[in-house]
Image (cartoon, grey):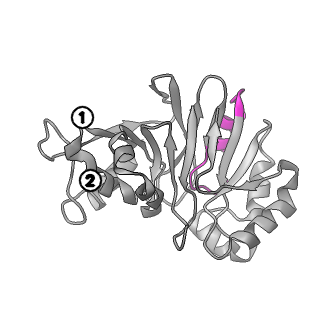
Amino acid sequence: MQLKVLGCSGGIGGSLRTTSFLLDHDILIDAGTGVGDLTLAELKQIDHIFVTHSHLDHVTSIAFLVDTVGGMRDRPITLHAAEDTLAILRAHLFNWKIWPDFSEIPSREAPYLRYESFRLGDTISLQGRHIRPLPANHVVPAVGFHIDSGAASLVFTGDTTACEALWEAVNGIENLRYLLIETAFPNAERDLAVASKHLTPDLLARELARLTRPARVFISHLKPGAGALTMEEVEAVVGAYAPRMLVNGQVFEF
């Protein structure tokens, strides 16, 4: 199994892309601006999109993806998310005011997009790839994902602040290899991080203290212009984990 980073930034500018990952050739984990770097041939192969939460930096490319390739495919793209998240996307994005509702185009019987809800505790299995939503704590309904190939596992926390239930789930993953976790703001912006339910390096250190499994730790969602400072602060407080900054184009094999 292969996970490629299409975008992992908390914003845009230059080469920065917002959160999106390509699992093998046919599954997206979130769909931020990084999806736009895929070729048309690659876009046509996307069969499933798993969404952590409804914020624009994680979902913006869904609208353009479906609009671009919907008519080129012989089956709909399946959008997987928690029911609360799907309700937000239907009400505020695919509502015919911001963007068409592609679950009704070209018809409800044969749409370009279909919605599939999941709940915490579910595992969605797709050709030997097992994807399980994990608890998260954000300002809108949110989850992380546990992706398991059978041989090893990768956890992507999505956007979250302190979340004890997340670590209870992660510590139960015996074959954990990679942990991708956000740290959106430097320590000086702690008040903003707390208000928006993100992490700073100091808050990250508290969370990683709950981790009892060995894992290779990678930091995502760094804000443009503050990435270098934030990583310096991360390394100062959680150096024992040898955290590395997630970068576009990075590939995880597991």
Label 2–label 1 contact, CB within 8 A: no
Quarter of the image containing the N terminus? top right
Q: Does 190 sit left or right of 209 as displayed?
A: left
Viewer-side label of 2, 1: 2
- Say how many tags the image has: 2
Q: For residue 68, which numbered disc appears in the image?
A: 2
Q: Residue at x 25, y 56 (%)?
A: 94
Q: Is residue 225 above or below residue 90?
A: below
Q: Say which quadrant the C terminus sits in.
A: top right
Q: Position of residue 111 (x, y in %)?
A: 18, 41
At a point 55% along the width and 67% down the height, the residue shown is 15
- The amino acid type found where label 2 is placed reads Thr
Residue drawn at (38%, 38%), measured in percent from left and top? 48
Residue 35 higher or lower than 17, as above or below: above
Residue at (29%, 60%) from the top-left corner? Answer: 93
Magenta stretch in the rendered image = 156-176
Q: Is residue 162 magenta?
A: yes
Q: Is residue 99 magenta?
A: no
Q: What amino acid is found at the position of numbered circle 1 in the picture?
A: Arg
Q: Is residue 38 left or right of residue 181?
A: left
Question: Quick one: SS at disc 1?
Answer: loop
**Location of mark 1 (residue):** 75
Q: Residues within 10 Å of mark 2 (few under 14, many from 20)?
A: few
